[in-house]
Amino acid sequence: MPLDAASGVHYEVQGEGQPLLIGLPLMASFTQLFGSELQPVLDGYLDRLTDRYRVLRVDYPSIGGSRDIAPDALPASTASPTGAIPGAPPSACNWPPALTA
């Protein structure tokens, strides 16, 4: 499973289609954290999603395979939503959204 070198976040990408981000409890290290006896639960979710979505499962900082990351090391002002999911178009991650009056 990949580890983003810039952020230290551990992730896994599966499926094709529109991007879909999933965190707790179905994170990248689900099996390592909850045991193989719960693998059918994860597989059940992924089977229903990966045929329509490119599913990005992440481990939050200091959980699973992600490194310990100080909160001040990940300010929103430095986030780069484009490329968060390999192959996702920039429009899939429009952030910040355009504000209208």
Image (cartoon, rainbow, N blue to C red):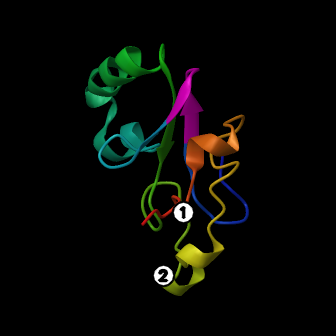
Residue pointed to by mark 2? 71
Instruction: State the quadrant of the C terminus.
Output: bottom left
- Vertical position of residue 71 compared to residue 58: above or below: below
Image location of residue 5, percent across then percent down: 73, 61
- Tell me the distance, in whole angstroms, between the alpha carbons under discs 2 and 1: 20 Å
Q: What's under tag 1, amino acid-wise?
A: Pro
Quick check: is 5 in the magenta stretch? Answer: no
Q: Is residue 29 left or right of residue 80?
A: left
For the stretch drawn in magenta, the main secondary structure is strand
Image location of residue 34, percent across then percent down: 29, 42
Instruction: State the quadrant of the N terminus.
Output: top right
Residue pointed to by mark 1? 96
Q: Nearer the viewer, residue 19 or 59?
A: 19
Q: Residues within 10 Å of mark 1 (few under 14, many from 20)?
A: few
Q: Which residues are magenta?
A: 12-19
Residue 32's image quarter?
top left
Q: Secondary structure at mark 1?
A: loop
Report whether residue 74 is seen.
no
Q: Is residue 66 left or right of residue 40?
A: right
Q: Residues within 10 Å of mark 2 (few under 14, many from 20)?
A: few
N-term mark: 2 or 1: 2
Q: Nearer the viewer, residue 39 or 100?
A: 100
